[in-house]
């Protein structure tokens, strides 16, 4: 397997800048997830690594070697798309064999058969080997697509939203299987998604991409608990982090005078920039405790039932906050309700730039 390095990559399509000075280091055997909204530059990044497109400037290294002049075949990477690139009139077996029968490979028939058998067993598609792929379900087709990548035993697996066309239950199953697969093969995976649940549950590290720029790199824990800015804070997490604009004075943030005032812990206040008078407060829904004795009061604006929990929208004057409560708690829309905010879990962002003013001390950011 192999380490992948991108150094100062720029890529434009006519007037549109797809990637702007992108530098990235994916470790050998790492499951790295590129997370970002549509149009962030995720697919472009994969295509450049695969050799399907060329950067305008910057360099791409695989296992320490500059592959800028190498063809896609020479790079020895496998690209799995969200749309299954299968031959419909071939059987599953023929589809799995196909990448091994190219002129460049010259693999013995016994080895081809062994690799196909191993991939089919790993992906639990042995019973489908003699079936034509136009008679498969979406989940079966995606397994065959993955199998076509696995049989090649590439140095790097590149995955472009491979689960996005599947239903929720199947996505959940294949998420676990893909992670298991990566650990079994000790393979280098670069996985692209806009789904933050996929990113958080699968990635050893996550790179958050926005507008062609890498906003932050970190472990799922770092990305969730110490977002570099308000973009990451609201993009990662469901529901999105609550952001409230407030005045900061005498160790207290006032969002709504007399109604929504929050004391800032002294240790945190000492780390805020001197002379700060306004900031944006960030609070996760799970860090708002709804119930008697909360000290703050809001009006219930809406309730969404999510099975194990409810997401409650609270209004304090014109300010809205989302809080999570256990499903069994009875809450009436338009009722007044007490709540509290855990001060130890608050995040503080600059009003103008959105940058986190008090990042976790141990985190590693990339901006």
Image: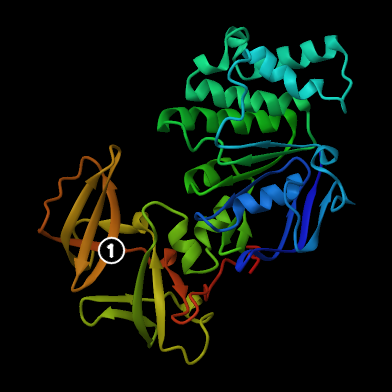
Q: Position of residue 102 (x, y in %)?
A: 82, 24
Q: Residue 319: name its quadrant.
A: bottom left
Q: Position of residue 341 (x, y in %)?
A: 32, 64
On screen, residue 66 above or below 151: below
Left or right of residue 211: residue 351: left
Q: Position of residue 148 (x, y in %)?
A: 69, 25
Query: Is residue 283 visible to the viewer in this orientation of the structure?
Result: yes
Query: Is residue 206 visible to the viewer in this orientation of the structure?
Result: no
What residue is at 53 percent from the left and 63 percent from the top?
226
Left or right of residue 81: residue 261: left
In this rendering, the count of numbered labels is 1
Quadrant housing the C terminus: bottom right
What residue is at 64 percent from the left and 53 percent from the top?
44
On screen, residue 96 above or below 355: above
Q: Residue 309: name its quadrant.
A: top left
| Pick the front one: 16 or 100 | 16
Visual colour scheme: rainbow
């Amino acid at each position: 397997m192999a380490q992948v390095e991108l150094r100062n990559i720029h890529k434009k399509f006519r007037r549109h800048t797809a990637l702007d000075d992108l530098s990235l280091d994916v470790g050998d055997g790492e499951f790295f997830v590129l997370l970002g909204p549509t149009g962030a530059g995720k697919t472009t990044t994969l295509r450049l690594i695969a050799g399907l497109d060329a950067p305008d400037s910057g360099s791409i290294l695989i296992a320490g070697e500059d592959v800028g002049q190498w063809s896609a075949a020479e790079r020895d990477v496998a690209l799995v798309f969200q749309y299954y690139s299968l031959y419909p009139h071939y059987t599953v077996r023929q589809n799995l064999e196909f990448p091994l029968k190219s002129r460049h490979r010259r693999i013995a028939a016994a080895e081809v058969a062994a690799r196909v058998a191993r991939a089919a067993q790993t992906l639990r598609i042995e019973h489908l080997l003699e079936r034509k792929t136009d008679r498969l379900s979406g989940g079966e087709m995606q397994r065959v697509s993955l199998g076509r990548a696995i049989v090649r035993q590439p140095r790097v697996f590149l995955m472009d939203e491979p689960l996005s066309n599947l239903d929720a239950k199947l996505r959940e199953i294949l998420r676990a299987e893909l992670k298991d697969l990566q650990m079994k093969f000790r393979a280098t995976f670069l996985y692209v998604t806009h789904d933050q649940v996929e990113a958080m549950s699968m990635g050893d590290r996550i790179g958050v991409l926005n507008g062609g720029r890498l906003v932050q790199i970190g472990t799922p824990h770092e990305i969730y608990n110490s977002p570099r800015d308000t973009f990451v804070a609201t993009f990662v997490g469901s529901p999105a982090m609550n952001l409230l604009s407030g005045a900061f004075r005498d160790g207290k943030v006032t969002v709504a005078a007399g109604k929504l005032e929050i004391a800032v812990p002294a240790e945190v206040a000492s780390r805020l920039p001197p002379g700060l008078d306004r900031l944006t407060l960030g609070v996760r829904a799970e860090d708002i405790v709804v119930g008697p004795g909360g000290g703050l009061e809001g009006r219930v604006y809406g309730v969404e039932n999510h099975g194990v929990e409810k997401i409650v929208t609270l209004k304090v004057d014109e300010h809205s906050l989302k809080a999570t409560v256990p499903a069994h708690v009875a809450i009436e829309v338009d009722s007044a309700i007490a709540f509290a905010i855990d001060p130890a879990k608050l995040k503080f962002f600059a009003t103008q730039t959105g940058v986190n003013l008090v990042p976790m001390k141990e985190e590693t950011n990339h901006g």
